[in-house]
Amino acid sequence: MIARTAQSASALALGLGTIHVLGERPRGIAGANHPHPQPSLAFPPEDVDFLRDLTREVVQAARIRPGEKRGGSVANTTGFTLIMPGGNYPAYWIRDFAMSLDSGCVTAEEMLDHLRLTARCQNGPEARHLKHGLIVPPFAIPDHINFDAGAVYYPGTYASNEEQGDGTYGMLPPIDDHFEFIHIAHRYYRATQRTGFLGETVGEITVLDRLLKAYAAPTTDPATGLVVTSAQDRAVGFGFCDSIYFTGQLLFPSLLRFRAANQLAELCRAAGRLDPIAPLRSDAKNIASHLVPTFGDRSRLAGWLRAATGVGRQADVWGTLYALHLGALGGTAARHAVRTVADAVTRETITCEGAVRHVPGDLDASPTSAWEKAACAHNTYQNGAFWHTPTGWLIEALSQTDRPLARRIFQDYIRHLRQGDFRLGTKSQAPWECFGRHGLAAQNGVYMTSVAAPWAIIRTLAA
């Protein structure tokens, strides 16, 4: 995500070169392609223990207690401990928190605290018009929330007033946070089996109604159920691509909407609210049925799904892996995608030290950019650097057909973490947010989702 710290902003300027759907492996989920339990991958126990302990300590380092400051920010005045993306981040990011919940390192109480704060910071029933022509739609979810509970709806700023956002990262707030808000609620419900929180009122609106309104806030295509954006009213689809320009139907936020529809239907049933269930289930089925027809391009991209249908039609490695993780692809499409993934790993076009690129190196949009239109230099940040956040999805996909290759990626990942472990007190700060080959373009150390998201999957594969 863009410009979170002075370090990341300066790195870009210099041009330096799972979540599981229902809190468990995706068997039994509509559209899943895991009908039978997968045997353990037999990872070395000492490596599994190392990753577990490192994840716990990274999450612990991300906690900011009431009254505490971080990265030159004001003190945390929310009344509870906030969990940051890691390192020196001076705000709570909804997506990073949500993507770390299946690690087992975040307590149910912390989930509820963050859920309530997000609900309080959700926009109200009227659109909010900001100074630079940007619009916060009714019931929009913030991109991040400052230590003083100020809601920031756009990347690239910590301003929570009418000055926030200038259109660089969209005219509307990012889309994914709306669905991550639902994920937090669902994960809390799964952890506790409690439903009372759904009836709590925030600004005279129940939490369940706020979840339903957040689900309905982003623009979607009624024919396909897919998330859509345009140049005129563009919104970032997924915060881990907020410096990349996309238009048309968008893959990754559509996958998050697929997940959210199923999760919200389950929450509604648990709360005895039956009327939204059928439309939500219908949305999920509609999205799944349109993924390959909309985002597939077998002649050009083999088994990859493209990121968008307008600007940004490149092969989306993260999106394809996540679609496999969710079980959102049909049997033939899933098998073809897994073969394409394994081939790319073998040819070393998507991985480095166990980390994953957004676009395969041999399918870059041009010699100077992985994407058609990006706000960061080639082979840096979201435009060609490598990230460990999706490493668990990759290992899970490879485990279906090539278990030695899956183990090799795990070993590469652990080797990288051991060499740069932030607990060693060296200049290295692994886990990094992302990095380039040969140690270049590394930024934002002690980064939570780089271990929390993979650990959520590794712990099930190693069981």
Image: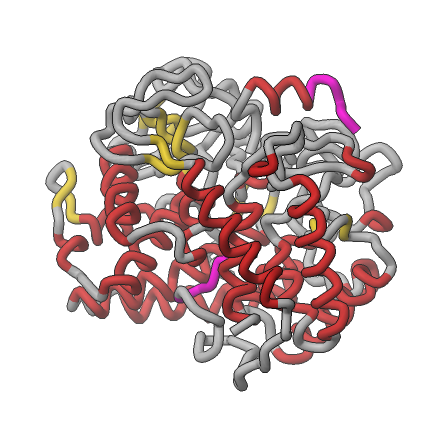
In percent of width and height, residue 72 lies at 43, 15
Residue 18 forms part of the magenta stretch:
yes
Q: Residue at x 66, y 61 (%)?
A: 394
Q: Is residue 335 left or right of residue 164?
A: right
What range is drawn magenta here? Answer: 12-22
In percent of width and height, residue 336 lies at 73, 73
Q: Residue at x 56, y 55 (%)?
A: 51
Q: Is residue 130 left or right of residue 45?
A: left
The residue lying toward the viewer, choosing from 308 and 17, is 17
Above or below, comparing residue 453 to residue 234 in the picture: below
Q: Residue at x 70, y 47 (%)?
A: 416
Q: Residue at x 64, y 35 (%)?
A: 245
Above or below, comparing residue 167 to residue 356 in the picture: above
The residue lying toward the viewer, choosing from 399 and 13, is 399
Count the numbered circles shown.
Answer: 0
In percent of width and height, residue 423 lies at 56, 38
Above or below, comparing residue 86 to residue 270 in the picture: above
Is any part of residue 202 visible from this angle?
yes
In percent of width and height, residue 80 lies at 24, 35
What is the basis of the colouring in this image? secondary structure
Above or below, comparing residue 214 to residue 410 in the picture: above
In terms of secondary structure, what is the magenta stretch mainly?
loop
Quarter of the image that includes the N terminus: top right
Q: Is residue 369 left or right of residue 260?
A: right
Residue 70 forms part of the magenta stretch:
no
